[in-house]
Image (cartoon, helix red, strand yellow):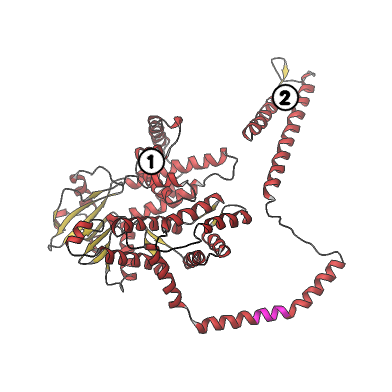
Amino acid sequence: MWDGLLGEKENTLPLRDSTKRFREMVEVLRRRHLLQGITPVKIRQILEDLGPTFVKLGQIMSMRPDFLPQEYCDELTKLQTGAKPLAFSLIRDIIEKEYGCRWSQIFRSIDEAALGSASIAQVHQAVLTNGERVVVKVQRPGIYEVMAKDIVLLKRAAALLKVVSNTSDVIDFSMILDEMWTIAKQEMDFLMEASHIDEFRHLNADAPYVECPAVYHKLTTSRILVMEYIDGIRFDDVAALEAQGFDMDHLGHRLGENYVKQIVEDGYFHADPHPGNIWIRGGKIVWLDLGMMGRLSSRDRSALRKAVFALANHDTLEMKAAVLSLGLPRGRIDHTRLYEDIAVLMEQYRDLDFGTLQMGLLTRQIMNVLRVHHIGIGPGLSMFARGVLTIEGVMRLCCPRISFVEIFAHSLELNFRKHFNWQAELDKFKREGYVLLKKTMRLPEQISDILRMTMSGQTKVNLDLTGSEEPLRRIDQMMNKLIIGMISSALLLGSSIICTTQMSPRLMEIPLLGVFGYLAALILCGRLLWDIIRSH
């Protein structure tokens, strides 16, 4: 029922509800003086005022530097995830309604003060009837319906934007909304978060210094998640960790190694590794809040390895191939300009020192190249970019002597050696050599066929001139304007001729058909003048 709610009601949202919500949105925009200009700070404040759906949208947009300028992404990362805690009586009622029994039959006690409160859920410490300490994560009532209604309104606005805009460079908000709704549904389905925890635990079973909270599956539902209570120290509480005798460089190196393993080997990584989600217990790294996880396909991981090796070897052509493998083109690509922009980027790293390289900065620069050339990225890669930026910031704050990018490059090298097989490479070389020899033997025959077809006039050659798109587009625009001008002239002339006749029906002694012709000519002329003024 829950998964189908949005799809079933997308076109049946009550007009009264949608109108009321629309008025609330307009009031927020008016209060924030949107018409006086847009700034990154103002956008963040507007999204916070509009509620949880828009906060989540801003968080997703902050992970998409291929859509927004970097200053907007940086500001949107500051969006508040905290929310005013619900009254404990309401939390107790939700628990009893979900379990169908008194809360005291399951819990010996529940701390009334919330450990944390966000837009989607609230967390409380509790003790089970058997004495075990746990954490109870309770979903806010009605949050699914509220977000579903907002998504419907946003999708309608996105569809309207597509209709009224005549440019192909407009951000595809529908794709962003779909991505946001997918992530939000994952975070609102605690059974899915429980499965994320189980999968993460399985993939990191061989890492003795990595843990995540155990899930009490019998007490977990789609709206209540019961987990083991973690009694540890936050990773960014350096003073407390050092007082306990921990070496921050050692912990930082382990943290970097594990996060790189999640990306390179598992392709399944924590998408929000901020300090509040990384704790230390008994010398082990404990990952919390596994509701939002990122996935990278083997193709994406291969492209990332290719990009790092290309940077190390100053191979611009290989870097261009890696960028194209990572991206999703949203139109024709000017390969000459793309190569030049990547060459400029590579020139900045001519004297590459992995000890001082900032992976986050490099990721931003690559994302900026993708944005300039209208090349999008998938959800997995956007989460990767956000995750790398966050984890690098955490390590720079807590253990500045440890370089995340050095760990990343070293892990890629070890991974390459681990999976390199001389016998497999030799077999591949033999197969490719055989195919090449076979094609070479057919080459004289193919050349003969080409010459025979050319002499008989059957040869056709298709040319794709690089850089010709812009002149052709301008010619196309000129022709469109010329055609509109000719149609307007024809309408004016035809309407004037009609006005000299006694044709009926008439409007103010003017034939009605002539009036329609004048109006159509006026609209077309206005459109033509607007296009001319807008194009300077």
- Say whether residue 426 is visible: yes
Label 1 residue SS: helix
Instruction: Judge from the rendering whether residue 177 lies leftward or rightward of residue 246; answer left or right.
Output: right
Mark 2 residue type: Leu
Indicate the quadrant where residue 216 lies: bottom left
Instruction: Judge from the rendering whether residue 122 lies leftward or rightward of residue 57; answer left or right.
Output: left
* On screen, residue 373 above or below 231: above
Is there a contact, CB below 8 Å, between mark 1 and mark 2?
A: no
Give the residue at mark 1: 44
Position of residue 185 measured from the top left corner of the image (x, y, whole percent)? 37, 53
**Among all residues in the image, which is located at the extreme top?**
509
Magenta residues span 434-440
Who comes first in sequence, dot 1 or dot 2? 1
- Indicate which label's residue lies in the foreground, 1 or 2: 1
| Residue 435 on the magenta segment | yes
| Residue 126 on the magenta segment | no
**Among all residues in the image, which is located at the extreme right?**
456
Position of residue 415 measured from the top left corner of the image (x, y, whole percent)? 43, 73
- Say whether residue 292 is visible: no
**Of the pair 475 and 21, the residue shown nearer to us:** 475
* On screen, residue 313 above or below 23: below
Position of residue 239 measured from the top left corner of the image (x, y, whole percent)? 20, 57
Give the residue at mark 2: 513
User: Where's the C terminus, which quadrant?
Assistant: top right
Mark 1 residue type: Arg
* On screen, residue 531 above or below 53: above
